Amino acid sequence: MKISLPLLIAMLSVACVLSGCQSAKARPPLASSAAQSTRNNCYSLLHQLLRDQADVSLLRFIKREQADLKSLVKKIAANSATGAKLLEEFARQDPSINLDDIRLPPGEAATREAIASTKKKELLGQSGDEFALTLLLTQTEALSYAWHLAQVAGENESQPDRARALAGVSKDMEDLYHEVFIMLLSKSKSSATN
């Protein structure tokens, strides 16, 4: 089949229009192993969670908290911000680390959004002990998840320095989890006696 030059030019023009005249976007290299894929996914989920946790202290501008709760929430926010920055530094130093590799199934993503929306409404609609208990419950969930994400990321990290740093993040999140849990127990006991 012989194609004339004007027809070839027309076909190329249509192809350019349909493709938006863009060259193919560079994609991050595919994971060379299951460990790297797991590591990147954990880094991404952990980074997203730590960024969200870094903002938890902003509740103090909306809600009045008891001094002990306020102090603990500030500590969680500071540790989370530090952890998020650490992951960002890892990604700057190593282009194989992709902090946007969330890969959640659509049902999981939609469920997480629904849970976040419900918790936001609950927290904004509550005050006093009810607010404190709900906030502490959400923090136990988030900190346990961060603790284990950092642990699994570290177990799948091939660079010993980064693996040690992730073990440190995991330990920080575990320690915070236990602090929140102890406060949750004390607040639930005091709520039960009131």
Image (cartoon, rainbow, N blue to C red):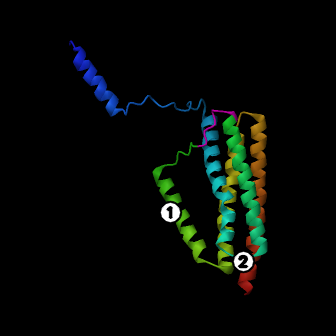
Classify residue 29 as left or right of residue 7: right
Residue 125 numbered tag: none
Label 1 crowding class (10 Å Cα cut-off): few <14, some 14-19, many 20+? few
Asked if residue 101 is positioned above or below residue 52 in the image, the reply reads above
- Local crowd size for mark 2, using a 10 Å CA cut-off: few (<14), some (14–19), many (≥20): some
Amino acid carrying mark 2 in the image: Ser
Q: Which residues are magenta?
A: 93-99
Quadrant assignment, res 39 = top right
Image coords of residue 59 (percent x, y) = 66, 68
Proximity of marks 1 and 2: CB atoms separated by less than 8 Å:
no
> In the rendered structure, does residue 95 fall within the stretch colored magenta?
yes
For the N terminus, give its image quadrant: top left
Element type at mark 2: helix
**Which residue is at 34% across, 28% downward?**
16
Disc 1 on helix, strand or loop?
A: helix
Report the residue marked by disc 1: 114
| Figure quadrant of residue 21 | top left
Q: Earlier in the sequence, mark 1 or mark 2?
A: 1
Q: Is residue 173 visible to the viewer in this orientation of the structure?
A: no
Where 115 sits versus 16, above or below?
A: below
Q: Is residue 35 left or right of residue 30?
A: right
Q: Please tell me in which quadrant of the rendered image residue 6 appears.
A: top left
Q: Residue at x 68, y 80 (%)?
A: 128
Residue on which the image places disc 2: 188
Number of marks in picture: 2
- In percent of width and height, residue 181 lies at 74, 67
Q: Amino acid at mark 1?
A: Ala
Q: What secondary structure characterizes most of the magenta part?
A: loop
